[in-house]
Image: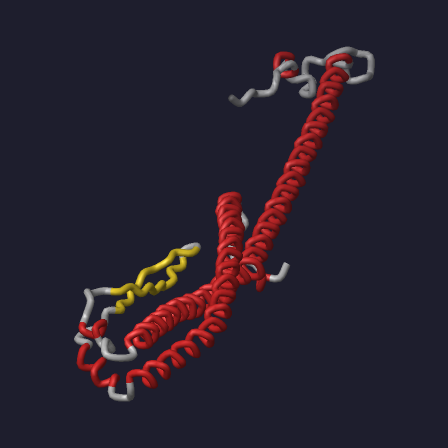
């Protein structure tokens, strides 16, 4: 097996257990990241749909606001803008920044709200053009709210886009690099362990066969020795019929002929 697509490890049972644990963790991480990517993609498409709707609505809203401003200028005159600027002390439209958590990804969320009491600007236009000024104010307030919503959607869209790309890279790395490498490592370790087991089995067979061969040879030698001793005890003479001679050195001591082998404990 090629060593480029597996880890360089020592093929032991302990290492096999560790690699299997890592493989299980990689597979679990792949499933979780896949679910996260699916959730982010679903939210991504939902935000994209809202952005399209908000931009479509923005065109009509800005058109109505511009027309309302034109009406107010026509009725109240061009000098009305100086009166409005002088009467406004601070902006009463505020933006609140919040975060929304989607599958572990924090998305910025903006909301607008009105702050403050009735100002002098509400009294502007009592002489003429008051209704047109109020309509213009309401139209531009709607435009500001829509702009804040669109900014929130586009910021969340960009954040989700980056998060989806990062998650997809991790998913592809786990699926195409980490998991195959760990699986190849497990296969390599199992193959090496099986090979070692076959070698050990073959060695044990050879040792057992050698022991059997040695025992058989020892039995043959023992039987031959017993046969020779039995033959020597049955023919004590020299074969000439005169019986045993007292000066015959071949007879030796009769006690020594029946002596057994020494036993080693």
Query: Measured from the top left, where is residue 257 in percent x and y?
Result: 65, 16
Please state which of residues 148 and 135 is positioned toward the viewer in this rendering: 135
Image-quadrant location for residue 241: top right
Residue at coordinates 52% horizontally, 58% vertically from top-left? Answer: 42
Query: Residue 9, image x and y in percent?
Result: 51, 54
The residue positioned 74% from the left and 15% from the top of the image is: 230
Q: Is residue 48 visible?
A: yes
Q: Does residue 68 sit above or below 190 in this rendering?
A: below
Quadrant the N terminus occupies = bottom right
Give the vertical position of 145 relative to 22 (above or below).
below
Q: Is residue 11 left or right of residue 75?
A: right
Residue 17 horizontal side relative to residue 139, left or right: right
Tell me if residue 170 can be seen. Answer: no
Q: Position of residue 234 (x, y in %)?
A: 77, 12
Query: Left or right: where does residue 154 sit relative to residue 207?
Result: left
Residue nearest the observer in this picture, 51 or 87: 87
For the residue pair 159 and 94, the one nearer the viewer reads as 94
- 234 is higher (above) or lower (below) than 110: above
Residue 248, position in %: x, y? 69, 18
Residue sitting farthest toward the front? 127
Q: Pick the residue in front: 166 or 258.
A: 166
């Amino acid at each position: 097996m090629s060593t480029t697509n597996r880890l360089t490890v020592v093929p032991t049972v302990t290492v096999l257990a560790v690699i299997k644990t890592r493989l299980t963790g990689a597979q679990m991480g792949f499933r979780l990241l896949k679910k996260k990517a699916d959730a982010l993609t679903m939210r991504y498409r939902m935000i994209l749909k809202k952005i399209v709707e908000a931009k479509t609505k923005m065109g009509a809203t800005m058109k109505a606001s511009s027309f309302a401003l034109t009406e107010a200028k026509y009725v109240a005159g061009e000098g009305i803008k100086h009166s409005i600027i002088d009467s406004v002390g601070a902006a009463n439209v505020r933006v609140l920044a919040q975060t929304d958590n989607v599958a572990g990804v924090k998305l910025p969320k903006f909301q607008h709200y009105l702050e403050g009491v009735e100002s002098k600007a509400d009294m502007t236009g009592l002489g003429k053009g008051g209704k047109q000024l109020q309509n213009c104010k309401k139209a531009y307030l709607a435009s500001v709210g829509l702009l804040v919503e669109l900014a929130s959607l586009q910021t969340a869209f960009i954040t989700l886009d980056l998060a989806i790309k990062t998650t997809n890279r991790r998913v592809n790395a786990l699926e195409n690099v980490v998991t195959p490498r760990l699986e190849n490592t497990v296969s390599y370790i199992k193959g090496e362990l099986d090979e070692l087991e076959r070698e050990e089995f073959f060695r044990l067979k050879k040792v057992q066969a050698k022991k059997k061969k040695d025992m058989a040879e020892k039995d043959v030698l023992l039987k031959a020795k017993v046969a020779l001793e039995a033959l020597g005890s049955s023919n004590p003479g020299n074969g000439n019929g005169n019986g045993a001679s007292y000066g015959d050195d071949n007879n030796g001591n009769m006690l020594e002929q029946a002596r057994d082998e020494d036993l080693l404990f």
